[in-house]
Amino acid sequence: MKLYSGHQVFLTGLLCAAAGAALAYYSVKISAADKEKNSVQAKAEDYLTENESFPMTNAVSQIPVSDTTGYTKDELQNILVYEKCNEAVVNITTQTMGYNWFYEPVITSSGSGSGSIIDVRGYVVTNYHVIKNASTITISLADGTSYDGRIIGQDKESDIAVLKFDPDDSVELKTIAFGENSGLKVGQKVIAIGNPFALERTMTTGIISGLGRPIQEDDVIIRNMIQTDAAINPGNSGGPLLDSSGNMIGINTVIYSSSGSSSGVGFAVPVSTAKRVVNDLIKYGKVNRGTIKVSLVQNTGRIAAHSKSRLSTGMIVSRVAENSKAEAAGLKGGTQAVRYGSAFNYQTIYLGGDIITAIDNITVTKLADYYSALEDKVPGDKVKVTVWRNNESKVLTVTLEEE
């Protein structure tokens, strides 16, 4: 048996106590770290539970759970939407060709805008005005690759166009899904992604400032537009307006500004319109709208005075197509032939017939109103047409036909 002195026993006890204290300290530290880790994970799980409608594919894997502690819920939501959608936003550049004095082809103008990939086969939705009159279209992806784009269909009345490019077989395209407009509320958060001033895939946020806005561009009125204060600048046109789930609820179209830059008043074509138009453009190359088979002339004060009519607005029914549904509904064309226009540039119109003043309670004062009232109608739909006949109003039910 080995014997120890009192001094050795004291030192041994002191060392054991120190080791025990150290072990207890690190155990407490590890336990606290585990609790902190579990707390972070619990917060993330709580957030995902509160936002179950959010499609979390792709985005979560790019943002580790441990990184969420530095962000608010709103910031995290913005990050997730951007990570999910930004690679599906493309930059569209166009060139318009013309001829110089020597009949040589030259570039007369160029432009740029944005678009959204909506199908892995390379279909892109954008604005009509972005690619209007374009001779060449280039579509640039997030990875820097560029492809020649071609027009599948375009629709001036809704300011929507569908393009197509042919991606390489090895390319896996990200897409943006169409959302819904039925539940939108003023004050709801929205996110815009686009290429303003050629700054690719720029993200801005805001709210829905108004719904159901009628906006006129050139000679076209687009109804039910979404108004937003999310910054929309030149180059944003054609890009997506997204909800907080990363679904497209609109296509950014126009800004109201005296300087041409964002002033907090921007507008987007609602996705309900986009769905219908895009489907027709891909299927038919055009929008299959219903129409009233009549020849129309813009009513004016001069025409009203000549025909002794008390009404100086609306669309004059000059002629009604024979054996058409418009004729069957009782629409009357004019009988008095007159020359309309200048002596060297005139057309023959017929006065004395009906003047269309409203369609389905939408007032029609000019041709843009007429087309706007029929914009979401299809062949076979029945519409209530209010006409001015013999200085009094009359309502007729007309079945629309194919153009």
Image (tube, helix red, strand yellow):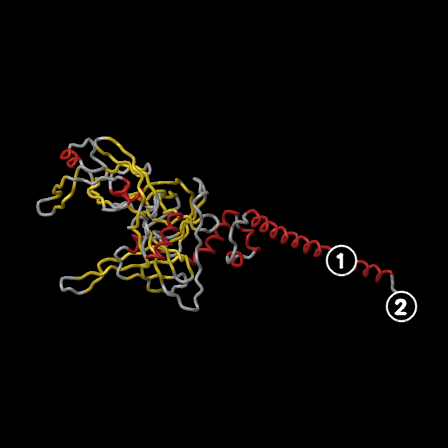
- Which residue is label 1 attached to? 18
Image check: 59 left or right of 343? right
Quarter of image, res 140? bottom left
Q: Secondary structure at mark 1?
A: helix
Q: Residue at x 43, y 52 (%)?
A: 178
Give the residue type at disc 1. Answer: Ala
Query: How far apart are labels 1 and 2 at the CA level?
Result: 24 Å
Q: Give the percent coordinates (x, y) of residue 318.
A: 19, 42
Q: Residue at x 24, y 59 (%)?
A: 96
Quarter containing the N terminus: bottom right
Q: Give the percent coordinates (x, y) of residue 46.
A: 59, 48
Q: Is residue 149 above or below residue 287?
A: below
Decide which of tag 1 and tag 2 comes sooner along the chain. 2
Q: Residue furthest left?
A: 343
Marks 1/2 in contact by CB < 8 Å: the verdict is no
Taking the image as drawn, is residue 209 in sight? yes
Q: Nearer the viewer, residue 278 or 239?
A: 278
Q: Secondary structure at mark 2?
A: loop
Label 2, residues with CA under 10 Å away: few <14, some 14-19, many ≥20: few
Q: Give the percent coordinates (x, y) of residue 376.
A: 35, 46
Taking the image as drawn, is residue 376 in sight? no
Q: Nearer the viewer, residue 76 or 103?
A: 103
Image check: 102 left or right of 166? left
Q: Nearer the viewer, residue 172 or 110?
A: 172
- Which residue is label 2 attached to? 2
Q: Is residue 249 above or below residue 142?
A: above
